[in-house]
């Protein structure tokens, strides 16, 4: 027997039958307080119903009775976007994975959106020219917004070299739920690592427009977390992950 919390459209405690394959299963439902909102609103305050609809007409936002706050209560965490930016080889993916693991072991739901990985699917049609990078980041920003709205701690790790593209993603989600993490490691460190041999190819002109070599990287001016070498040494991924976890704890993202 499973115990489920019903959406607000169910009234009171009762036993419902769900149609599932196999034997009929009785499911005991508990009543739960669900926040009600104005029709037509998605999040109080900002960024709500109308985004990216310039080309579509005659469309309407449809509200769901289960809302962000309900999902957050269920998950005992506040959904957010942790946006990790930095040069290739600066440790973005490594930090994303270390952070996801650390939070997972503490009982929190995370999901990693990694630039390299998404370019195998969702963003496979995009190159590395500036407008394609912008579109890459726009799409990932929109997906990250959905994860955060689902109550998930969404960790996006992309070079995201342009400030305006990162700021556009920031503006998609409620204030304070976009946490920009700058991997502030110098090119020399990243290039010395070169795990995929891409810097070598860029230096010999076999890759054109490689970030940090012949394409720009604009460091954040005002981000939430800056990770840097300490005494000339790069902190371990675990140490940096703990730094981000501390930020989440101090800012009320982890309820338990
Ligand atoms: N020209 C050029 N410039 C930068 N990076 C390049 C390029 N060509 C391929 N790669 C590989 O693509 C990975 C970066 O993808 P992103 O989606 O994060 O890039 S961006 O945010 O759109 O700039 C990046 O992965 P990371 O090394 O993990 O950062 C590279 O492996
Ligand atoms: N904190 C760290 N200390 C030492 N090496 C690291 C650290 N973080 C990442 N690395 C190594 O640096 C290389 C690049 O890391 P990666 O996470 O792939 O960077 P990015 O995603 O920014 O390209 C990998 O070989 C990785 O093992």
Image: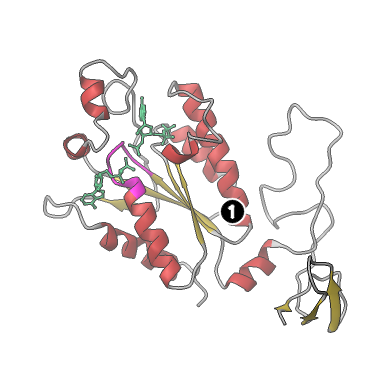
Residue depicted at x 28% and y 62%: 238
The residue beneath circle 1 is 147
Quadrant of the rendered image holding ligand 1: top left
Say whether residue 39 is left or right of residue 111.
right
| Residue 188 percent location from the top left of the image | 17, 35
Relative to 226, residue 245 above or below: below
Q: Nearer the viewer, residue 203 or 26?
A: 26
| Residue 58 percent location from the top left of the image | 87, 33
- Visible in this render: residue 5? yes
- Visible in this render: residue 174? no
Examine the residues drawn in magenta and state their main secondary structure. Answer: loop
User: Which span is picked out in magenta?
Assistant: 85-93
Relative to 193, residue 57 above or below: above
Q: Residue furthest top?
A: 205
Residue depicted at x 47% and y 28%: 133
Say whether residue 38 is left or right of residue 206.
right
| Residue 55 percent location from the top left of the image | 75, 26
Q: How is the image coloured?
A: secondary structure
């Amino acid at each position: 027997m499973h115990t489920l919390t019903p959406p607000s459209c169910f009234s009171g405690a009762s036993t419902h039958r769900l149609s599932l394959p196999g034997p009929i299963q009785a499911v005991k439902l508990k009543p739960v307080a669900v926040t009600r909102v104005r029709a037509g609103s998605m999040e109080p305050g900002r960024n709500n119903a109308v985004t990216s609809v310039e080309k579509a007409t005659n469309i309407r936002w449809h509200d769901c009775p289960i809302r962000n706050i309900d999902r957050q209560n269920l998950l005992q965490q506040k959904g957010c976007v942790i946006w990790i930016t930095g040069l290739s080889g600066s440790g973005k993916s490594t930090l994303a994975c270390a952070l996801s693991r650390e939070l997972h072991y503490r009982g929190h739901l995370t999901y990693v959106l990694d630039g390299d990985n998404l370019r195998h699917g969702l963003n496979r049609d995009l190159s590395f020219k500036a407008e394609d990078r912008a579109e890459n980041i726009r799409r990932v920003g929109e997906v990250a917004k959905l994860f955060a709205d689902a109550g998930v701690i969404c960790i996006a790790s992309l070079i995201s070299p342009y400030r305006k593209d990162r700021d556009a993603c920031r503006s998609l989600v409620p204030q304070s739920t976009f946490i920009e993490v700058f991997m502030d490691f110098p090119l020399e460190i990243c290039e010395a690592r070169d795990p995929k041999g891409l810097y070598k190819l860029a230096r010999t002109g076999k890759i054109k427009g490689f970030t940090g070599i012949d394409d720009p990287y604009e460091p954040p001016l005002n981000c939430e977390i800056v990770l840097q070498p300490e005494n000339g040494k790069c902190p371990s991924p675990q140490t940096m992950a703990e730094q981000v976890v501390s930020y989440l704890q101090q800012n009320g993202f982890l309820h338990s």
